[in-house]
Image (tube, grey):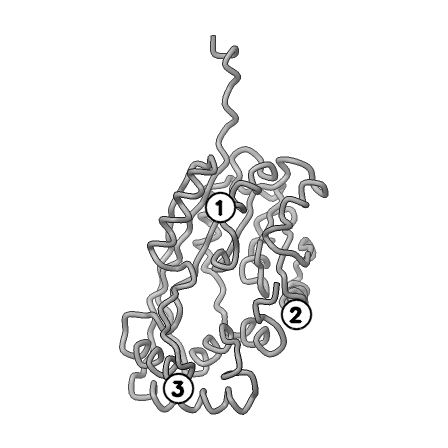
């Protein structure tokens, strides 16, 4: 599965995709009773924005991603941060059940998916994850703010107009960060037999033009942004259009939807 995350796009992703706030990891640890004896899996791990800090909260973490370039950069980041308890696996959500063969049933305390679930078959994933999870553990879906071009502020609206003109397409897809998607994920987790918990962490962030441009290129693929010259031309256009709207402040809403595996029900004869 080629999602376009390779080469220079990975460099932009690593440099400009922000990390998740500490409060989000506090929510995971509290809700899933995560301890230093547990194993966690970060699915669609990218360059390790969740994987690396999660490793400080668990005995071991497995980072899975379908992009070799993403995994290579994530491995380098983990080494630089002294995290030796992370293993990296090339794979997609469809291959998650294979971990049962490797680790056994009920071996995982947490499966995290950070702003990547829109690439996956979430209903199938939620059901497939069940046998891997220990009681009280669960699967957590996290977003880290909506796309830079879908913010309710003037600089974002100017960015959206610039990108739509450049790409010759309308930009409305929120990549699973919108309220409708959060409700859909929560409903699917409930249908799959999980106890659903919804939490959030909010913070404000001041951005530079370089961070905005880098954030755009971290999500960009296709012919219109394929070469350095094209990216430079688009970057100049973004600087010209957004310059009058400085400063660039973003309110970031970290939405967390957790499906927690419930206690196994007692057999009927045990309740007689």
Q: Quadrant of residue 75?
A: bottom right
Image quadrant containing the N terminus: bottom right
Label 1–label 2 contact, CB within 8 A: no
Q: Position of residue 191 (x, y in %)?
A: 43, 38
**Res. 263 mark:** none
User: Disc 1 or 3, which lies upstream in sequence?
Assistant: 1
Name the residue located 52 percent from the left edge and 10 percent from the top edge: 269
Residue at image location 54% in from the left, 72% down from the top: 13
**Classed neighbour count for the residue bearing mark 3: other residues with Cα under 10 Å, few (<14), some (14–19), many (≥20):** many
Find the distance from the CA under tag 1 to the CA under tag 3: 38 Å
The quarter of the picture where residue 216 lies is bottom left
- Up the image or down, 70 lies above or below 230; here it is above
Whole-angstrom CA distance, mark 3 to mark 2, is 27 Å
Residue sitting at x 53%, y 40%? 127
Image quadrant assignment for residue 205 = bottom left
Above or below 1: residue 272: above
Residue nearest the viewer, comparing 9 with 34: 9
For residue 238, the mark is 3
Q: Residue at x 55, y 45 (%)?
A: 110
Q: Report, in whole angstroms, how far the alpha carbon at label 1 lies from the one at label 2.
A: 27 Å
Residue lying furthest right: 102
Q: Are marks 1 and 3 in contact (CB under 8 Å)?
A: no
Tell me the residue that label 1 is attached to. 123
| Residue 108 rendering spot, x and y as whole percentages | 61, 41
Tell me residue 106's x, y (percent).
Answer: 62, 35
Task: Give the numbered dot on residue 69.
Answer: 2
Helix, strand, or loop for circle 2?
helix
Give neighbour class at mark 1: few <14, some 14-19, many 20+ (Cα, 10 Å).
some
Q: Secondary structure at mark 1?
A: helix
């Amino acid at each position: 599965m080629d999602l376009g995350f390779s080469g220079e796009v990975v460099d932009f992703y690593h440099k400009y995709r922000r990390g998740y706030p500490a409060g989000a990891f506090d929510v995971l640890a509290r809700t899933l009773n995560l301890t230093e004896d547990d194993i966690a899996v970060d699915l669609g791990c990218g360059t390790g924005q969740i994987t690396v800090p999660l490793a400080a909260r668990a005995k071991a973490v497995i980072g899975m991603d379908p992009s070799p370039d993403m995994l290579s950069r994530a491995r380098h980041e983990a080494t630089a941060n002294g995290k030796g308890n992370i293993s990296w696996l090339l794979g997609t959500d469809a291959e998650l059940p294979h971990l049962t063969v490797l680790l056994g049933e009920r071996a995982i305390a947490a499966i995290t998916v950070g702003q990547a679930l829109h690439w996956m078959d979430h209903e199938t994933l939620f059901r497939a994850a069940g046998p891997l999870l220990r009681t009280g553990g669960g699967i957590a879906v996290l977003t880290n703010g909506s796309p830079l071009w879908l913010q309710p502020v003037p600089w974002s609206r100017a960015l959206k107009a610039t990108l739509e003109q450049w790409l010759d397409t309308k930009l409305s897809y929120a990549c699973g960060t919108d309220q409708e998607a959060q409700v859909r994920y929560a409903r699917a987790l409930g249908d799959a037999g999980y106890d659903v918990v919804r939490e959030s962490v909010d913070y404000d962030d001041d951005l530079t033009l370089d961070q905005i441009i880098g954030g755009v290129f971290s999500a960009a693929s296709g012919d219109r942004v394929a070469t350095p010259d094209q990216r430079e031309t688009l970057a100049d256009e973004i600087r010209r259009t957004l310059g009058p709207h400085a400063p660039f402040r973003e309110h970031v809403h970290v939405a967390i939807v957790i499906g927690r595996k419930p206690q196994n029900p007692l057999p009927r004869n045990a309740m007689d």
